[in-house]
Image (cartoon, helix red, strand yellow):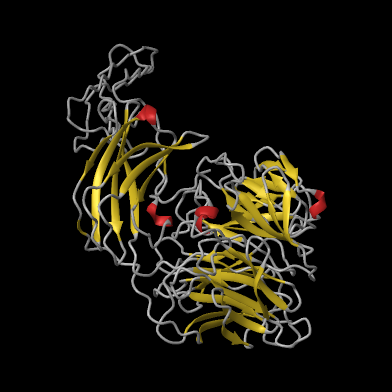
Amino acid sequence: MATTLGVIVLLSVACSDKNGDSAGEADADTDADSDTDTDTDTDTDSDTDADSDTDTDTDTDTDTDTDADTDTDTDADTDADTDTDTDTDTGIPKDCGLAPTDATWSVGTPVDDPGASLTCSEVPAVSWEVTEEWTYFLGTFMMGLVAAPQPGDDYSTIFLEVEDKLIGLDGRDGAPLLDTTIPEKDNDGSTPAVGNANGVPGLEYVTTRWYEAYLYEIATDTWTTLDMPAKGDDEVIALSDIDQDGIAEAVTPSASLELDGTFVMDFDGGLESTGMFLADLDGDNFPEVLTASGIWSPLDGTGVAWDKSFDPGYTIYGGTVSVKGETEVFFQTGRGAMGLGYADGTVDEIYAKPVVGRYLSALGDATGDGVPEICVGDGWQYLYLLDLDGISLYNWDISASIKGGGGSGGCTMADLDGDGEFEVIAQSRAGLFIFDGATGDELLYSPDYPTAARDSAPIVGDFDGDGSAEIALVTFPDVLWTSSQLVVLGAAKDRWARTRPVWNQLGYDVTSIRDDGDIVGTPLPPSTTYGGVFRAQPAHDGDFVDLESAATLTCASIDAVVLDFAVHNLGSVEAPAGTTLSLRSFDGSTWSEVSSYTLKDAVPTGSVVEGTVTVAAADVGDRIVLEAVGTDTDCDIINDRSNEIVR
């Protein structure tokens, strides 16, 4: 199982030559030969060392007979070369020198980065008029859009399911990139997930049906059946590295499975539980599964049910927040109540107004006060913006005077104008709405994009790679709601803010997936990210610093570990002196800082700082990251952490 934030490196213990022998070991050839051997064994001991020497040991050992003679053939292979012995198993040198007493940092000064693509700059005045960038006709009911870039692409593939077909569309123009048959048909819609879950370049896609779940490996064009322990668990699925080994698992509300279909654990998460997400609620660095029935460990099945007085029903939408000095979970339930839940299963009800049905919610700082707000609908007429005490800040009529017009659909948040405050985007039977969460103003209403699908709200991302966000949604243009089409909308004038190219599952959390589609092993707590977010897309724009870290394992031995690193400033503002480089390691249970280094120089926009850090192997665990922590506001805090190195 191996998630990776970027580069995954596996280390083996011994370096092997072509004979399967470790370099320098006595090559006990045990050839069955008789004593008269003219032995020309030519034992081309191509140890594939990174040196240019081919190490041709002419052992003169040509055995022509077959007598049992133990020709010990002590091929000592001492190799008096100065090579670093780079073996074909990993390509990583193992002669790293002695372990340093303390971490040793060698850091250069900032230099111009000619390959830098600046990602953060002032956003022009935003127009709220929209234009259709492209449309794809589906012809039948569907829901559950997800998007992520494939390897090497600077644009997204948008994935959708239509009955028994999985279709992948080019985010730039809607051209079909993928069309494959899912092993089982579905007429009820799905809420799938996508991401690079196994550490091998390429995306995996998971979806559920009544009896089974299925995984599609895009690179190999293969489907794997994930055999569910109980039928009926067909509503939602997610990808998460539940055991922190670097490879993600597939998780539903009632079970977890390896990507090859191996069963991990089942738990009492509730069949047909619509809405589910994973978060580290108890602070142990391993995620819990949060469903309408309670909080469960996807590793051993233990957990607690929500307090029955709260009557959560079978639907849950929400995300982690931090309002009392600990990690809580906000959620909305199937009967419409709002609550703050805790790791012990207790719940503080914060909003108990009766509502009809269920409504997909989102969480983000929409008012600019540094604390998240909640957007949620009553499933009939109104959309509410609530604070974490359950006080209604705004309510908007999204029915357009249509009876029940506020039903179906859901809400999403996104910072489209780059001001640090999330706009509220809602879709209903009446059409598409965009609201300003700070003022309550209606920024856009278009009756052209109604929906009849529950658990389905617009998704937001830079799907075509043009440096401006788009909104992708499914709309039902006919009054019978029998056919649908996917529409991608953009700003009609100028541009919207730059943002990420990913929205990878129903319970989308910006910290659980990198921009390149890699599933993050141990995400940053969403409650501390962008003020607290769930199903909300931040802007990666504005006049800010944007530090981006990358790291590569360049040597690893039993004594020492060496990493090369680079820290870029892709923002429009200089990063002041004082940026801290923190080398962090995961020992199987906790992340901790191994060593840190403070940059003495400012990092100008469009420049890079490169260096090397050497640490004792005994001081680092199986996974390592480098994180750049600046002194000013950062445009994109997700890329402050480097790719995660698995050793």
Q: Nearer the viewer, residue 406 or 588?
A: 406
Q: Where residue 530 appears, x then y in whole percent?
A: 48, 60
- Position of 308 with respect to 556 (left or right) is right
Q: Where residue 49 appears, x then y in whole percent?
A: 26, 35
Which quadrant does the C terminus fall into? top left
Is there any visible trace of residue 518 in the rendered image? yes
Q: Is residue 472 above or below residue 98?
A: below
Q: Residue at x 78, y 49 (%)?
A: 230
Q: Is residue 584 above or below residue 28?
A: below
Q: Nearer the viewer, residue 217 or 238?
A: 238
- Position of 632 with respect to 407 (left or right) is left
Q: Nearer the viewer, residue 257 or 442?
A: 442
Q: Where residue 434 appears, x then y in whole percent?
A: 57, 79
Q: Nearer the viewer, residue 314 or 136?
A: 314
Q: Quadrant of residue 237?
A: bottom right
Q: Residue at x 60, y 87 (%)?
A: 446
- Position of 99 with respect to 171 (left or right) is left
Q: Residue at x 52, y 70 (%)?
A: 422
Is there any visible trace of residue 235 in the rendered image? no
Q: Where residue 417 appears, x then y in whole percent?
A: 45, 76
Q: Residue at x 59, y 73 (%)?
A: 458
Q: Quadrant of residue 598?
A: top left
Q: Is residue 349 above or below residue 327?
A: below
